[in-house]
Each structure stands twice: as structure tokens, then as C-alpha cells.
Image: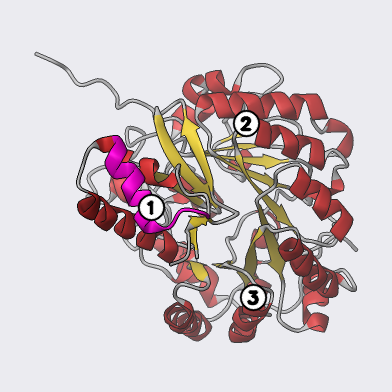
Amino acid sequence: MNVPGPPAIPPPLGLLAELTHRCPLGCPYCSNPVDLERRNAELDTATWQRVLREAAALGVLQLHLSGGEPAARPDLEAITATATEVGLYANLITSGVLLDAARLKALAAAGLPHVQLSIQHADAQAADRIARFRGAHARKLALAEAVHAAGMALTVNAVLHRENVDALEAMIALAERMGATRLEVAHTQYHGWALRNRAALMPDASQVARSRQIVAGAERRLAGRMAIDFVTPDYHASRPKACMGGWGRRFLNVTPSGAVLPCHAAESIPGLSFDRVTERSLEQIWYGSAAFNRFRGTGWMSEPCRSCERRELDWGGCRCQALALTGDAARTDPACALSPDRRRLDEALAVMPAEGFAWRRP
Amino acid sequence: MSAPRLSPHARLHYDRRRESWVLLAPERVLVLDDVAYAILRRLDGQHDVARLAAALAEEYDAPASAIAEDVREVLEDLRRKGLVQP
């Protein structure tokens, strides 16, 4: 008789390379950790290039160059060139404020096919206030033009919260004018700074409902011209998201100093230790590291996930959110209506709204 | 009729780990079957659908009319996804 072993671990599809935590913007919805890694701890160029080679050999196809602001690194072009050389499809996730047309041209020459540019609002003054950077919005509009001139694809990304959700239609129209072929509209995910600012960021239920209607209408209107990826808010949902497509199933994340994480907030989970690219290969880490295997598959689940028919659809939701709201990363994500901890979300919603952000920078 | 080509943002890539051809684009990985790959590797912006079909028919020793149908179907699907122009 054959006893089935654990299901084989598929190779990863995507790598999020956080080249630096440095960022000129100070958005209060940032999901990066409250304690940012320092510049002198960042991996050097050669190490990043080795990581990209290892990633391609491991089966990674999509590379997301992220941060912080990745353009804060002067070696972004060299890193991009290596991605192209090893066949990774690179996506530059940027605030846009540190890139001019000349640098973008250099990135195009290095083979960069796709830029994902954030916007904070449709109105320049409101956008600059949220980004905490005067003139940021105007620089973003200029960068969008440079992206087209360089022949790259453009995705516009907008994170929604109480200060901009009512401008959603105008932001969609702005993304059209900017020539985006993709628009990501993501309700804030409450990790890191965003969790600290939750009471000031959380939209109310009617705003969330209206944002769904607006996106649905825009999707119909823009079909074939601009694709919209809508990330719904967990706190107003009844089922959790398959965070990262399941822990250790599709993605890995390398922090500026070289820690390899199953998701970019995973360092908030106590008791997990993360291997580093300076100590082990990416392949050893993907298949063998304790942190990746801790919540992989369904074996770690307790009820109500363990016997749930959706356990291989949502993989129990988000571990970091379970930790942040219940104190235990191994519990069911409270975004699920079946979670015994669901009331913690509802309690959080009941105390909204609060005024005023805690800013990342004075 | 105009000659189709891959969108400048789409890249054909041989995935050694999974041993298959894929088409890569922003936030997208399309695993290609043999038919789709045979068509896509010939897109050069100079051959129209009829000439593509004729070349494929000769290579695979199949009727050009049936192949032209396949070619149109594959290209139309990729056009809708923004991966083939025009």
C-alpha cells in the first residue's frame, strides 16, 4: 500500500526584492515594518546579482524590484541588467520621485519592461500631503510620460484609505490619462505603519461598498484598455484572502539586509527565524527553511480551517494579521466570518474613526 | 491584413525548471502549449496570419485552413490580454 507523502513543494513564481527600506515619501499607510533596516546593513550589488541568478535557477519568473524606494540605490541599473540576463521579468515598484527621464532610459537599456508607479490621490495637493513630499505628484506625472517614451508598460497603483477613497473615480481617470494598461486599487492592508495608523485610515462600510461599485463600473467601461486589480479590504470581508497565494507556495521576499521571508510582514511573527541569502542558497531556503515550512500547506491548521472546504483556496488567510489581531499567528485569520476571533475586527471597526496620522518622519 | 507581433512588454521565455515555454508580461505568466508556442515564436510583425498558417502547415504537414483557424484563435485571445499587437 502506498502511503501518500506530503505534497511536493512547487518552485516559486515570484521574488520581491526589497533593495532598500529608504524612501523619500512618508505615506501613513506604508506596510513596511515600523523598525526599518539601515543603509549600512543593505546587501551589496554582487550579492543581489547572485540572488537573482539563484532565483532564476530555482524557477522564479517574475521579479519585483521594491523597497522602500528602489531608485534610492545607485546600482538599480546593474541589478536590472542581471535580471534581464538571467531571464527574469522585472517590475520596478516605485514612488517615481527619484527617477528622471535619463535614468529611466538607462533602466530601459538594462531591459526593464514594466514600471509600477504609485499615486496617493488625484489632487496634487492632497497627494503631496499623504506622501509627505512637496511636488511628489507632479514628478509622478512626469515619470509616467517618461515610461511611455522609453517603451515600457505602466501599472498605476493606488492604496485606498479614508483620505482618498472618495476620490477613487478621479484616480481611475488619472490612471487612464497617465496611460496605464493596469491599475491596482488596493484597500490598505493593516501591517507595519498602516496598523499603527489604522483608526485614521479605515474607511467606513458605505465608502467600501461604494468603492466596489466604482471599480466594477470602471472594469466594464475599460475592458480591453486598462485592467483593474482590486484588492478588497479584509476588515469589511467575510472570507480571508489567500495571502501571498499561500505561505511558501509562490513567493519569496528578500529584505534589504538579505533575510528571506514568505511575505514581507513575516518578521512581525515571533518565534520564526529567517535564513539569510548570505548564509544559504535561495534553493536551500525555499525547500528547507523552518520559516517557510512552518505554515506551508494545511498541516499546521487548527479548526475551523482544518476541516474547511476552502482550506486550499485561502490557505487560512494571512498569518501576520492573525498574529496582529489574536496574538497567535497559527490561528484562523480573523477576516474569516468563521473565525472565533472575528469580533476583534468588528471591535476595531467600532472605534473608528480617529483623526490624525502618526507620520513615519517628522 | 496587418502582421501581428508580440507586445513590446511581452517576453517569450523557456522555463527550464518547469520545462515549458511561457509568455511573461506585467503580473502575468502564461504557460504555452506546443501550438501557441509554434505560433508565437514566428510573430515578427512581417508575416500576416495567412503566411503564418502556410508556414505552420508546411512544417506540421497539416491543412492550412485548419491551422489558420488555430492561429486566429490564439492571436485573438492574446490580443484581448494586450500581449499581441495590432
Quarter of the figure with the N terminus of chain A? top left
Disc 1/disc 2 C-alpha distance (Å)? 49 Å
Q: Is the magenta stretch mostly helix, strand or loop?
A: helix
Q: Residue at x 63, y 74 (%)?
A: A161
Residues at badges 3 and 2 in contact (C-beta under 8 Å)? no
Q: What stretch is highlighted in magenta?
A: B46-59
Residue A303 visible, this angle: no
Q: Residue A143 carries which label?
A: none
Q: Do labels 3 and 2 share a chain?
A: yes
> A180 or A98, which lies in front?
A180
Q: How far across and how far down the image is residue B52, in percent?
A: 38, 50
Please state which amino acid type lies under the numbered disc 2. Answer: Val
| Left or right for A210, reference B76 | right
Please state which amino acid type lies under the numbered disc 1. Answer: Arg
| Label 2: element kind | strand
Please state which amino acid type lies under the numbered disc 3. Answer: Ala
Q: Residue at x 81, y 74 (%)?
A: A137
| Mark 3 lies on residue | A175
Camera-nearest label, 3 or 2 = 3
Kindly give the residue lying farthest to the top in the view shown. Answer: A1
> A153 or A28, which lies in front?
A153
Q: How far across and how far down the image is residue A271, in percent?
A: 57, 31
Q: Is residue A48 magenta?
A: no
